[in-house]
């Protein structure tokens, strides 16, 4: 009896294939990985139309929870020294580097790039993190000022974080575009709720795993996957959101707006609570277009999510 | 038994003692008699009570029912500030908020009461005169209750004389836990007498401090003891001890007031206090009130929330329902 069992075990191990361990793609909210409160998922296809993953389809309640988490984390993140924020963001780049192969495969499959192109896109994304990490303790020097005033006062202006920033991540560039839109608000101490590219969300889920295992405090970045048309309106009208980046309001096909909702409507909803809004980029003819993210970044994107604080301080006599 | 116009029970001390004797089946009301009665109450199935509370917490309350629940919660809130750092100014701003929680919305009701420490009662009374919002005072050496009976009674008398409409007293948990039930009973009876002294009628809420009572059996016993001693309300906690109010403990207390009314015909209110911060939690309590005690208790005269930050969350939810946009804490007052 014992012999038979042993023999059959050996046969099984020798001939059958190992069961694959499939991954559950979840949201990233408040430093945790919840499924969508709604329990829904949606199918994501690769560039050739083959099944890639079942990804959590976030609901407006998930969006609400994400804003609560971002608000709770904001004061602490803004209170960290600029130098410390720089170290933390640089650490993200380090951990991203360790996930390079996985990211190359995911970006390549989702965006339909060759291995070499995907490799370049990932390298560019990691370098982008490093570039923005360097800005944390420099932005106030560049954008701040000692203003001349007619009186015995120091008059100093400096950029301060605006608060909770919602980012509609670019639809086309699933990693480089994502990094180029979420890193800038983080530099000055904003916290972010990002709605990942609807058709290409997998690199965003991987990025959230990177964020969870680097030193970024929970809630500083919250990643939602799902239908942008469902998630964007409640976030645009949310009173506890301070700013919105509409980079992702340009469809994969170049169509403007989010699945039928024009970004103008989102901007109007955002205006109700006086949010800062960064409109989508335009091409040379003035049409909405997703920019070429490989172009050299500029610090203006950081300053789009800041408030200028000016203090008067008497000069000692 | 008679009830006043406000619906509060107004039993005479003789009625209270008589009903205590008849319910306990003892003429003496000493420790032994109380022990016989209280330990003879059916035990609480802890797993069952937790399970029932968890089940009641899963009900989905939406749209018009939610709108009704939110307004009812506002009407039931005892807006509380019990800090060493309280100032007359803070009490006045709290009073203003209790009267008009949402200044630009006339449909928003007032809170039930403002709950303050003894020495700030005159400030609250002045600020709330003529508004219908009650003044509640915590008395009897709140929150520990560790003072002589004379001191605790003087504390109560001062609050009542200053015009408090409601007195929140604490029981002596040390005496209760060591079985000196007669002492606890006598304390409550004596404080109640102070509340009714000189033609006044201050409404007596008895704080059991369930976080220190250790078991649900003790919560049930303390509830019966307080009700038999003439409490108008039984209240879970001071808010100074963790855990404060929990849903299962409140369910046990709601069962006690329901059974007490069935047996004696006297209705007693319930007030969970401490730790209820969100509308979602508060709505769970309303579901429990309706399901366990019954709709008769769904009224500010019979159910209250002791809370400070809860009101802000309810106001945010009201605005969310009215406008469809999620609201933020920047749009409500801090405290």
Image: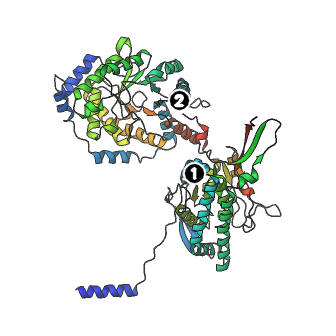
Q: Which residue is mark 2?
A: B109
Q: Chain of mark 2?
A: B
- The image position of residue A260, as x and y in percent, is 68, 58
Q: Chain of mark 1?
A: A
Position of B41 compared to B65: left or right?
left
Quadrant housing the N terminus of chain A: bottom left
Between marks 2 and 1 in the image, the one whose residue lies nearer the viewer: 1
Q: Which mark is residue A281?
A: none
Q: Does residue A177 appear in this view?
A: no
- The image position of residue A62, as x and y in percent, is 54, 54
Callouts 2 and 1 on one subunit: no
Q: Which residue is mark 1?
A: A70
Write the residue at 71% across / 54% down.
Answer: A139
Q: Residues within 10 Å of mark 2 (few under 14, many from 20)?
A: some
Quadrant housing the C terminus of chain A: top right
Contact flag, marks 2 and 1 (Cβ < 8 Å):
no
Q: Is residue A231 above or below residue B266?
A: below
Position of B216 compared to A259: left or right?
left
What SS does tag 2 mark? loop
Position of B132 compared to A6: left or right?
right
- The image position of residue B76, as x and y in percent, is 45, 31
Query: Distance between the Cα atoms at labels 2 and 1?
Result: 32 Å
Q: Is residue B295 above or below residue A282?
A: above
What SS does tag 1 mark? helix
Q: Does residue B212 appear in this view?
A: yes
Write the residue at 82% across / 64% down.
Answer: A284
- The image position of residue A286, as x and y in percent, is 81, 60
Foreground residue, B12 or A306? A306
Write the residue at 58% across / 41% down.
Answer: B329
Q: Residues within 10 Å of mark 1 (few under 14, many from 20)?
A: many
């Amino acid at each position: 009896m014992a012999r038979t069992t042993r023999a059959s075990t050996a046969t099984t191990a020798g001939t059958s294939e190992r069961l694959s361990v499939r991954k559950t793609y979840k949201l990233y909210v408040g430093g945790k990985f919840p499924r969508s409160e709604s329990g829904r998922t949606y199918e994501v296809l690769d560039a050739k139309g083959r099944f890639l993953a079942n990804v959590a389809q976030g609901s407006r309640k998930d969006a609400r929870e994400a804003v609560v988490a971002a608000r709770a984390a904001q004061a602490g993140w803004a209170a960290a020294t600029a130098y410390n924020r720089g170290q933390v963001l640089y650490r993200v780049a380090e951990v991203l580097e360790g996930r390079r192969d996985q990211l190359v495969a995911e970006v390549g499959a989702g965006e339909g790039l060759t291995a070499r192109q995907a490799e370049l896109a990932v390298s560019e994304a990691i370098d982008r993190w490093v570039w923005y990490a360097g800005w944390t303790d420099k932005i106030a020097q560049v954008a701040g000022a000692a203003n001349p005033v007619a009186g015995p006062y120091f008059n100093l202006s400096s950029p301060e974080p605006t608060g909770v920033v919602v980012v509609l991540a670019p639809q086309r560039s699933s990693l480089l575009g994502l990094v180029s839109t979420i890193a800038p608000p983080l530099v000055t101490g904003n916290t972010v709720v990002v709605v990942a590219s609807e058709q290409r969300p997998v690199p965003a889920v991987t990025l959230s795993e990177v964020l969870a295992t680097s030193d970024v405090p929970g809630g500083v970045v919250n990643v939602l996957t799902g239908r942008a048309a469902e998630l964007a309106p409640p976030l645009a009208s949310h009173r506890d959101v301070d700013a919105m980046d509409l980079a992702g309001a340009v469809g994969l096909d170049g169509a403007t707006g989010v699945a039928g909702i024009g970004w103008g409507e989102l901007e109007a909803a955002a205006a109700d609570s006086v949010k800062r809004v960064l409109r989508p980029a335009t091409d040379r003819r003035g049409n909405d277009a997703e920019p070429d993210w490989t172009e050299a970044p500029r610090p203006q994107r950081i300053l789009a999510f800041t408030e200028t604080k000016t203090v008067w301080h008497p000069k000692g006599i | 038994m008679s009830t006043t116009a406000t619906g509060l029970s107004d039993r005479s001390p003789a009625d209270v003692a008589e009903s205590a004797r008849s319910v306990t089946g003892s003429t003496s009301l000493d420790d032994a008699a109380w022990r016989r009665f209280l330990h003879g109450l059916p035990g609480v199935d802890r797993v069952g009570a937790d399970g029932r509370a968890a089940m009641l917490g899963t009900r989905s309350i939406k749209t018009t029912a939610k709108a009704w629940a939110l307004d009812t919660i506002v009407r039931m809130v005892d807006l509380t500030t019990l800090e060493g750092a309280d100032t007359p100014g803070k009490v006045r701003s709290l009073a203003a908020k209790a009267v008009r929680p949402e200044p630009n919305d006339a449909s928003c009701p007032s809170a039930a009461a403002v709950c303050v420490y003894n020495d700030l009662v005159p400030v609250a009374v002045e600020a709330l005169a003529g508004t219908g919002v009650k003044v509640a005072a915590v008395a009897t050496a709140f929150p520990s209750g560790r003072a002589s009976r004379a001191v605790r009674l003087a504390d109560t008398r001062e609050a009542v004389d200053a015009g408090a409409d409601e007195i929140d007293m604490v029981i002596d948990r040390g005496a209760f836990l060591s079985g000196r039930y007669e002492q606890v009973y006598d304390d409550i009876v004596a404080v109640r007498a102070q509340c009714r002294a000189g033609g006044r009628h201050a409404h007596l809420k008895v704080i059991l401090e369930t976080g220190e009572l250790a078991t649900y059996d003790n919560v049930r016993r303390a509830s019966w003891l307080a009700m038999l001693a003439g409490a108008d309300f039984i209240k879970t906690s001071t808010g100074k001890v963790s855990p404060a109010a929990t849903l299962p403990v409140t369910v046990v207390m709601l069962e006690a007031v329901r059974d007490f009314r069935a047996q004696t015909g006297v209705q007693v209110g319930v007030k969970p206090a401490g730790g209820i911060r969100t509308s979602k939690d508060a709505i769970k309590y309303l579901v429990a009130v309706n399901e366990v005690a019954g709709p008769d208790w769904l009224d500010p005269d019979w159910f209250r929330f002791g809370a400070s930050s809860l009101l802000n969350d309810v106001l945010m939810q009201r605005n969310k329902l009215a406008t469809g946009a999620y609201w933020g804490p920047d749009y409500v007052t801090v405290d």
